[in-house]
């Protein structure tokens, strides 16, 4: 399904669409970018651009070179979401080319003002973690990792925002933009109904589940986004499309989308039920629940685990199966 051209470049099923693989310094492993060659009025487009390390730059350039493309030739760059392993070379590509830089409007601050945006993100999450009974040294560890992730990002200007319902021309065909929030609030998928190909970014991954991550709301007076609930709804929506193959941000292409989605929904229902059972034993804080569910967690995974467990608590609350009792500013979760 992916035919190797060189160590970093693979041909997809769709003529003119290439998958370029790059290493990341993170536990997730390699990340894909996708190159759509220019065709007719459709500009030569790169979708995502890895994490900014020397190894990834060499991989991206080698992958592009297999198709006769250099950074200066890129006419359009689409960033699928704001995570560090997807927007790495946006600034370098913008500096070397006249590329249009496209992303969802929620991605704009992460690209244009990454450092203040990251600091605001940390500041927003701090009281949520304290309410979850997370110790201060653990919060400090999460913020050190946030700073480390931020150290890879260079500012780049978004020249066109993309939203649900928009269309982009790729490879001479019209692709539909789907705003599939969940893993990230700004995540975009692209779908071409004739070939039934989906560029699924981190919304649909075959071998790992896409953690819906905690994020601030769009405006400060809005409630905390419930990204797991968003994610489950958007998974079901995407499963309605008649997808032949989804090319994801990480790992192998997905050919059995409805079964994969069904499996993910079942897994989340099961995890929520385990959580409910733990809350039925005695009232527990978010941090206690994370420790019980993931006793061997390494520090870089703490933020992912806190995000996921809070997401499952959101699910239990929505279904009337759990509630929080507050003591000294800390939430103790109980089964309803
Ligand atoms: Zn991501």
Image (cartoon, helix red, strand yellow):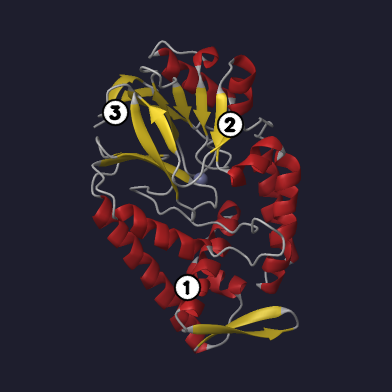
Q: CA distance from mark 2 to mark 3?
A: 23 Å
Q: Position of residue 292 (x, y in %)?
A: 52, 73
Q: Position of residue 332 (x, y in %)?
A: 62, 82
Can residue 251 be seen in the rendering of this structure? Answer: no
Dividing the picture into quadrants, the one containing residue 237 is: bottom left
164 sits left or right of 142 in the view: left
Mark 3 lies on residue = 12
Q: Residues within 10 Å of mark 3 (few under 14, many from 20)?
A: some
Residue drawn where x is 39% and y is 67% of the image: 268
Q: In the rendering, which numbered label is found on residue 315?
A: 1
Residue drawn where x is 41% and y is 62% of the image: 232
231 sits left or right of 117 in the view: left
Q: Is residue 335 above or below residue 159?
A: below
Can residue 205 be seen in the rendering of this structure? Answer: yes
Q: Residues within 10 Å of mark 2 (few under 14, many from 20)?
A: many
Label 1 SS: helix
Contact check, label 2 and label 3, Cβ < 8 Å: no
Q: CA distance from mark 1 to mark 2?
A: 33 Å
Residue drawn where x is 45% and y is 13% of the image: 69
Q: In the rendering, which numbered label is found on residue 88?
A: 2
Dividing the picture into quadrants, the one containing residue 45 is: top left
Q: Position of residue 14 (x, y in %)?
A: 27, 28
């Amino acid at each position: 399904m992916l035919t190797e051209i060189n160590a970093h470049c693979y041909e997809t099923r769709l003529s003119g669409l290439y998958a370029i693989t790059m290493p990341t310094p993170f536990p997730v492993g390699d990340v894909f970018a996708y190159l759509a060659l220019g065709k007719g009025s459709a500009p030569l487009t790169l979708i995502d651009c890895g994490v900014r390390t020397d190894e990834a730059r060499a991989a991206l350039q080698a992958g592009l070179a297999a198709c006769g493309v250099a950074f200066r030739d890129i006419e359009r760059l689409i960033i699928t979401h704001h995570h560090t392993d997807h927007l790495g070379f946006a600034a370098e590509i913008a500096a070397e080319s006249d590329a249009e830089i496209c992303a969802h409007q929620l991605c704009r601050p992460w690209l244009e003002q990454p450092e203040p945006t990251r600091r605001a993100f940390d500041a927003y999450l701090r009281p949520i973690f304290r309410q979850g009974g997370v110790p201060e040294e653990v919060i400090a560890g999460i913020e050190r990792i946030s700073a480390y992730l931020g150290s890879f990002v260079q500012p780049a200007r978004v020249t066109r925002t993309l939203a649900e319902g928009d269309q982009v021309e790729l490879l001479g065909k019209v692709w539909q933009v789907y705003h599939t929030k969940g893993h990230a609030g700004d995540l975009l998928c692209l779908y071409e109904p004739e070939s039934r190909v989906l560029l699924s970014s981190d919304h649909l991954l075959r071998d790992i589940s896409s953690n819906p991550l905690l994020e601030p709301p769009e405006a400060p007076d809005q409630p905390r986004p419930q990204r797991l609930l968003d994610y489950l709804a958007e998974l079901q929506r995407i499963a309605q499309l008649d997808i032949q193959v989804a090319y994801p941000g990480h790992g192998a292409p997905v050919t059995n989308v409805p079964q994969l989605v069904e499996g993910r929904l079942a897994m989340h229902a099961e995890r929520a039920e385990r959580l409910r059972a733990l809350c039925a034993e005695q009232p527990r804080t978010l941090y206690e629940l994370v420790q019980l569910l993931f006793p061997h967690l390494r520090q870089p995974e703490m933020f992912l685990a806190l995000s996921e467990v809070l997401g499952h608590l959101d699910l239990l609350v929505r279904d009337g199966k759990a509630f929080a009792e507050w003591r000294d500013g800390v939430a103790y979760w109980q089964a309803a």
